[in-house]
Image: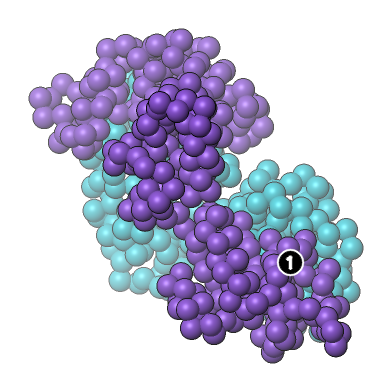
Amino acid sequence: MIGQRTLLNHIYKQILNDRFPRFAIFIGEQGSGRRTLASNVGANMKSHIVVGDIKVDAIREIITNSYKVVDKTLYIIPNADNMSPSASNAILKITEEPPNNAYFILTCESADNLLQTIRSRGVTYILEPYTYNEKCDYINEVASDISDDDEEFILEVASNIGEIRQLLKMNISEFKDYINLVIDNIAEVSGSNAFKIADKIALKDEEDKYDARLFWKAFSSICAYRMTSNYEAESCLKYAHAVAITGDVLQQLSIRGINKQMLFDKWILDIRSEWL
Amino acid sequence: MKITDIKQQIKDKSLQDFYVFAGEEIEVQRIYINKIAEISGKEVCRIDSIADVWEDIVNPSMFGEQYVYVVRDDKDLMQNETLQQRIADGVLGNNILILLLTSVDKRTKWYKSNADKIVDFERLSDSILMKYVQREITLNKSVCERFIAICENDYSRLLLEIAKIRSYMQVFTDLTADEAFEQLVADGTIYTPPKDAIFDLVDAILKRDVPRVYDMLYQSYAVGEANMVILSVLYNNTKQVLQVQACESSDIVNSTGLTSWQVKCAKDKCGYYTIGELVTIMELIQKIQKGIILGEIEDKLSVEYLLVQIL
């Protein structure tokens, strides 16, 4: 497990003293290692590990089985923020009467997406941000032949190991070129043309397009760089506003059920409105 | 299992002891249930749950009768693996059990393991329904096609509407079946469901036709359209109108990335709002959608909340 030293030490102490909670919630961004951490906890507890699904039938099956297990078993339910209301209500049962040999870890991106009743019954663990050195060490371990420019770009943009992995899979020069093209032209082209920026962005989880979150983070990063390397006040302000607008959009991405297409269109309109 | 397979079983008189009938075509299911009962020489017994008759099935009496048991949406039957195994082992004996499903998820393990027993009774095709309708009543071909479309290819509904036409013709004896049909459609006795109300609604909004907006809105609600869907369709159409209206190039298709059909439809709605107003509509819809998700805006008021601000 990369990083999460303080959190892991705290959890190991709890396991050692047999005080790890029966129902825990791990909160962190996508790619921050929530599931890896949960598996790590299971290994340390020397328990069987069962990774569940968020569908209501799967949750009900897990609950039924958890009351029958004899050996210590850790049930991991990943991406619990996407649980339907029925699944959320089904899981309430084990929060109120936890079975003897079962432990539950829910992972999610934002606690706000979970039912208040689930949040109040679980012990919350928030994953730590990755330090610069931790990210550096990881990149050097898995991609030692990467160019310095690309490495610098990845370190600026990615905030966790999952994002580093995603960036390493893509052609970073092409990605940077695309973002620079967007920055240079978003306010220059006609409004109808500007919407075509979204054609290369995975707004419906398409695999052959750029991840929306990474796109916005990279956009923000490059705008911030241009802001700091530009001495004209007007330009500085323009890039500062773009960073603020993009930051707001990135926050909204974690809202469960948010329409990414509408969010992207709004982002385009807001940037153009500032820059025109 | 296909319908042709069950037809063959009926023809060969080699019926299974357990069937699952899924799909919307209830009248055709009823026909097959009656046929199975007729071929097997048993009566149809409709039950609420298999539990009601389980004792009789498992411990049949010497002089007890066998039935074609018909049950709808029995969750116990679908989820209880022990029960399913016992049925597979032949516990039904000479009884036949038919499970009717209102809806079925084809991705479930249960569906996949019972695929050889499940018959999907989808809506019948136009050509087959034409034959069935013409057997019951003589209609002109184009009238018959319209009749089938109005009844949404629902065979049960067709039979009911045919009964209305016949009753009407018994009173007004000088009318032909075609004339009787036209009159009954015109006065609403044969119900014509509003089609594509949502697209008519969106057109009305983008053309600022206020009376028609509210008429189409209530029709959309009547057919059960969700507010989120209305907002989503309106958003996409507004964006297309904005793209076309704001396009400075003569080559709109290449410039916007829209298809020529989308450009044509959007052009029809251009000019009723300024570009600024179209942008405002898009921003409002995005704000409302987010508000619904966060619980800040009530879903059922969302569309009217939007309309009040933009019309």
Q: Residue visible at 41% across and 18% down?
A: B205
Q: How is the image coloured?
A: by chain
Give x and y (percent) for residue B239: 34, 28
Q: Quarter-wise, where is residue A95 in the image?
A: bottom right
- Work out which residue is located at the far front of the displayed protein and give it: B173
Left or right of A127: which side holds A192?
left
Left or right of B180: which side holds A115?
right
Q: Residue visible at 42% across and 37% down?
A: B150
In the rendered view, tell whether residue B151 sits above or below residue B2.
above
In the rendered view, tell whether residue A203 sits above or below residue B293.
below
In the rendered image of the structure, the colour used to display chain A is cyan
- Work out which residue is located at the far left of the displayed protein and give it: B250
Q: Label 1's element?
A: strand
Left or right of A71: which side holds B129?
left
Task: Tell me, yes or no, if residue B106 can be seen here.
Answer: no
Task: Tell me, yes or no, if residue A163 can be seen here.
Answer: yes
Amino acid carrying mark 1 in the image: Cys
Q: Nearer the viewer, residue A32 or B66?
A: B66
Crowdedness of circle 1 by 10 Å Cα count: few (<14), some, many (20+)?
Answer: few
Chain bearing tag 1 is B
Give x and y (percent) for residue A80: 65, 56
Residue that mark 1 sits on: B45
